[in-house]
Amino acid sequence: MSGYILELQGITKIFPGVKALNNVRFQLKPGEIHALMGENGAGKSTFIKVITGVHKAEEGKIYLEGKEVDFKGPKEAQAAGIAAIYQHVTSYPDLTVTENIFMGHELKKNGILQWKSMNRDARKLLEQLDADFSETDEMGTLSVAQQQMVEIAKALSTNARIIIMDEPTAALTKNESEKLYTITEKLRDEGNSIIFISHRFEDMYRLASKVTVFRDSQYIGSYDVDSITESDLIKAMVGREITELFPKAKLKIGEELLKVKGLTRTGYFKDISFHVRKGEIIGLTGLVGAGRTETVETIFGITKKDSGEIYMEGNKVTIKEPSDAMELGIALLPEDRQKSGLILSWGLGRNVTLPTLGNYVSNGILDEKKERDASKKYLEEVDTKAVSIHDPASSLSGGNQQKVVVAKTLAQDLKVIIMDEPTKGVDVGAKAEIYAIMGQLAEKGFGVVLISSEMPEILGLCDRVYVMCNGRITGEFSAEEVTQERILELSMEKTKSSSTENKKGEVV
């Protein structure tokens, strides 16, 4: 055991009616980046809370540098050199970076806060991380990536030797992720040990030397990253082979449903033109910040266009607000499902029927049985895993929350469904199920617009692909023509002042 800085054996954690961890184990070496992977609900979050002293396991032992420990709470774990950085940063936005770093372990002398010393130490920590902001900046003015950097600085300020990172790249751009990778490797090289939890295979292959897989609250295995294939890792995570990850059948594409011509919103995007037909999935891709989300939000009526035209089934239409788009048969699944797609405190059923509640009202009285039957039908259609339609949306995993948003869409009389990063933050099993749903929608004759930053999704699902860069469409490809290299080339900002050409030879 002395060869490990942290070891857990036979850890079992039971909540009322649920075995959240069932005899799991884990071993972390000094100076190692060790990935922890598994589907939502596999037990990863509970595992973190056991390590950090938030939860006490009913069974099992924890060893720190070969000595058994029994943390009575988070402060004891912190004092032992363990820190966790969570996916959703819990900061104080109105306080400074220094105040956030030293929150809970302020430097005091004779009961007086030593602000000069704390600012100095915070500055040194930020310099160590190559931060591009100041210790006196307010936390609320920082980007998500910068806030995560503050969390890392906070961990270092407690002299943490073991740092747990929970989905740290989920909300980051590619460039921000690369910077986080560099920081993580630097922490490792300085002797820290990292547990890196992620759904993204690129994170694991880029950083980790070892990966441990949990499934259904149980330990499945630990593997050398260099020797495990992606397909074997998927099988370990989901318990089956996903041989057909992108199941969309080859369909006969129907007539045009939605057409956008010359759409412009000053400062966000310019001269956007594309169309989608029945049974077709089109991709709208490009780097984060290219204007993809802003474009579809304008189409859906969330923001106003400055110029351009929108056609639905050949007819020019006016969309001033989302209700106009919905009446025309257009739906938008927003990128942030928790803030914009769901009311988390409400039950699943009411979330599904909310946009169509009037369909279940007769003489001013809500027919609750009819509403329940409808919501249950749509939730079953997308195979939502929940105990009851009355369960709050907040109780579900990310993948199942996304299915509720899809079910809400199906409950409406729609023709075009716009999906903005539909698999963001969900595990590989849930991704496969969402891909299957998208294929089924196309088979039923829906037109699907997919916004995604994940290249395999774009290449595997789409019949045609539009690439955006700096608020403009820089290329269009058929499924047969599109390649990762072509997408990346047209996604990158051009440094030359001369015009470039798309694959059709047109100046863009």
Image (tube, rainbow, N blue to C red):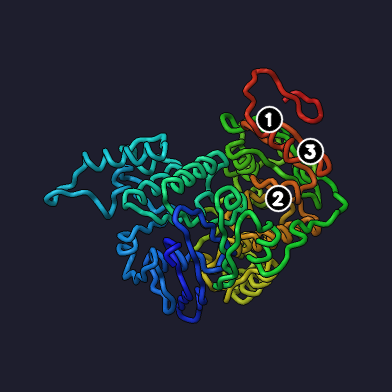
Tag in front: 1 or 2: 2
Q: Give the residue pinned by disc 1.
A: 271
Image location (x, y in percent) of residue 466? 73, 38
Element on which disc 2 rests? helix
Q: Quadrant of the N terminus?
A: bottom left
Q: Seen in the image, is 135 located left or right of residue 25?
A: left
| Residue 104 in sight in this render | yes
Asked whether, in this view, residue 286 is left or right of residue 176, the answer is right
Given the current orientation, which residue lies at the most extreme front position? 2
Q: Position of residue 174 (x, y in %)?
A: 57, 41
> Would you say 33 lies left or right of 92 here?
right
Residue at the disc numbered 2: 457
Q: State the SS at label 1.
A: strand
Question: Which residue extends farthest top?
Answer: 498
Q: Residue sitting at 73 percent across and 63 percent down?
A: 242
Q: Residues within 10 Å of mark 2 (few under 14, many from 20)?
A: some
Q: Earlier in the sequence, mark 3 or mark 1?
A: 1
Q: Nearer the viewer, residue 170 or 192?
A: 192
Residue at far bottom of view: 17
* Crowdedness near tag 3: few (<14), some (14–19) or many (≥20) residues, C-alpha within 10 Å: many
| Residue drawn at point x = 39 percent, y = 54 percent | 90
Amino acid on which disc 2 is placed: Glu
* Mark earlier in primary sequence (1, 2): 1
Q: Is residue 125 above or below residue 419?
A: above
How far apart in space, not on screen, are marks 3 and 1 (Cα)? 18 Å
Residue assigned mark 3: 477
For this rendering, which residue is in front, 385 or 329? 385
